[in-house]
Image: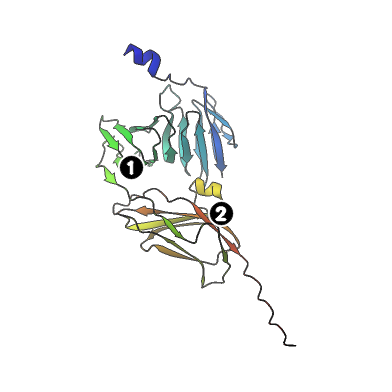
C-alpha cells in the first residue's frame, strides 16, 4: 500500500491547476474560470484549469484536449466541470448535464456524473449522457470501462456495450450497441454536379450492421462541425433503409456520417466522417458546325 501511495498513484490536481485546453469551439460556448462568478466567451486554445466550468448552448460544441492525452467532445446544451467538480476530485472531468463523447489516450480516465463514476481504461472511446432528470447513460464504443453507481453497483463495459443508470443510482441491464456502419457512396472527395429538384443531387448509402434497426444520418458544412457532431446541415433519424436521397443541395462541401440504432432506441457510434462536393455542372459544349 505504501509503495502504491508514494510511487504509483497520481496526485490529485489542485484547484486552479492547468490540465487541459480547448482545441475546437463552434457556436456559443462559455467558460467560468475556477473560483470566479463571471462567465466569459470561450476562445480556441484557451487553457482550462481544475475547477473551471464549460457550458455549451444549443447548436454549439467544444473539444477539450487534456494534458494526460484524452480528447473530449462536449455536445450542445451541456455543462462540464474540469477536474471532476469545484471540489477536490481525482476525476478528470464531470458531466453535470448533457452529452459528451470521449477518446482516451494511454492513461485511464475517471469521469463522474451525479449518479455514476466511470473509469475508462487506456485507449477507450465512448459517450456519457446525463438527462434532465439526473439519469445517466454510459456507452463504450471501443476498449473497456468500469462503471460504479452511487448505490455501489459495479458494471464492466466492453466494446459496443452500454448501461443506463436511473436518477437514484440504480443500474439497468448491460446492453449491446450496434457497431458503426461503413459508408459506401458517394466516394470520399467525390464531386457531384448540382441537380435541380425533384431529382436527387446525392444518394447516400452505407452497409447494414448487426442489430441496427434504424439509422441516423448527420451532415455538416465543415469538418469542425462534423468532428463536434453538431449536424448543422442535416440530422435525419429513423431511417430503415441503407440509402438516403438528398435533393436541392447548394454548391459546396458536405461532411456526413451514419450511426445505427438498436431495437431499444440506443444509438451506437457514428461511422467515420466522409465528404463530397457539389459543383456547378459542366457547360454543354457547342455542336460543331459542319464545314
Q: Secondary structure at mark 1?
A: loop
Residues at badges 1 and 2 in contact (C-beta under 8 Å)?
Answer: no
Which quadrant of the figure contains the C terminus? bottom right
Left or right? Give the position of 276 relative to 272.
Answer: right
**Residue 60 in the image: above or below residue 3:** below
Q: Which residue is mark 2?
A: 221
Q: CA distance from mark 1 to mark 2?
A: 30 Å
Left or right? Give the position of 164 relative to 251.
Answer: left
- Seen at 47% across and 37% down, the residue is 72
Nearer to us: label 1 or label 2: 1
Q: Position of residue 233 (x, y in %)?
A: 52, 56
- Seen at 55% across and 37% down, the residue is 23
Task: State the image quarter where residue 169 is shown.
Answer: top left
Outermost top residue = 2
Q: Name the foreground residue: 50 vs 158.
A: 158
Residue 168 in view (yes/no): no
- Seen at 39% across and 62% down, the residue is 242
Q: Name the foreground residue: 39 vs 45.
A: 45
Q: What scheme was used to colour the molecule?
A: rainbow
Using a 10 Å C-alpha cutoff, classify the residue at mark 1 as few (fewer than 14 neighbours), some (14 to 19) or many (20 or more).
some
Which quadrant of the figure contains the N terminus? top left
Q: Position of residue 151 (x, y in %)?
A: 26, 30
Q: Secondary structure at mark 2?
A: loop
Q: Position of residue 36 (x, y in %)?
A: 54, 25
- Which label number is shown at residue 60? none
Left or right? Give the position of 196 relative to 113.
Answer: right
- Which label number is shown at residue 159? 1
Using a 10 Å C-alpha cutoff, classify the residue at mark 2 as few (fewer than 14 neighbours), some (14 to 19) or many (20 or more).
some
**Residue 181 in the image: above or below residue 250:** above
Which of disc 2 and disc 1 is earlier in sequence?
1
**Residue 244 in the image: above or below residue 160:** below
Amino acid at each position: 500500500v505504501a509503495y502504491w501511495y508514494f510511487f504509483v498513484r497520481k496526485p490529485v490536481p489542485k484547484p486552479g491547476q492547468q490540465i487541459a485546453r480547448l482545441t475546437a469551439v463552434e457556436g456559443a460556448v462559455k467558460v467560468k474560470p475556477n473560483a470566479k462568478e463571471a462567465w466569459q466567451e470561450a476562445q480556441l486554445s484557451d487553457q482550462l484549469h481544475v475547477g473551471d466550468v464549460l457550458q455549451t448552448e444549443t447548436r454549439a460544441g467544444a473539444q477539450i484536449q487534456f494534458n494526460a492525452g484524452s480528447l473530449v467532445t462536449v455536445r450542445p446544451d451541456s455543462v462540464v466541470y474540469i477536474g471532476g467538480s469545484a471540489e477536490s476530485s481525482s476525476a478528470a472531468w464531470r458531466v453535470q448535464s448533457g452529452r459528451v463523447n470521449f477518446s482516451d489516450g494511454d492513461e485511464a480516465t475517471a469521469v463522474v456524473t451525479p449518479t455514476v463514476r466511470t473509469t475508462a481504461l487506456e485507449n477507450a472511446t465512448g459517450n456519457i449522457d446525463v438527462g434532465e432528470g439526473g439519469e445517466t447513460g454510459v456507452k463504450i464504443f471501443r476498449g473497456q470501462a468500469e462503471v460504479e453507481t452511487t448505490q455501489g453497483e459495479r458494471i464492466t463495459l466492453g466494446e459496443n456495450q452500454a448501461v443506463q443508470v436511473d436518477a437514484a443510482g440504480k443500474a439497468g441491464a448491460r446492453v449491446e450497441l450496434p457497431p458503426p456502419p461503413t459508408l459506401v457512396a458517394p466516394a470520399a472527395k467525390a464531386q457531384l454536379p448540382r441537380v435541380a429538384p425533384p431529382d436527387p443531387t446525392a444518394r447516400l448509402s452505407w452497409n447494414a450492421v448487426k442489430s441496427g434497426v434504424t439509422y441516423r444520418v448527420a451532415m455538416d458544412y465543415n469538418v469542425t462541425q462534423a468532428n463536434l457532431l453538431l449536424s448543422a446541415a442535416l440530422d435525419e433519424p429513423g431511417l430503415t433503409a441503407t440509402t438516403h436521397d438528398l435533393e436541392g443541395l447548394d454548391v459546396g462541401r458536405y461532411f456526413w456520417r451514419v450511426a445505427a440504432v438498436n431495437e431499444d432506441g440506443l444509438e451506437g457510434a457514428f461511422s467515420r466522417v466522409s465528404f463530397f462536393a457539389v459543383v456547378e455542372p459542366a457547360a454543354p459544349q457547342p455542336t460543331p458546325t459542319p464545314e
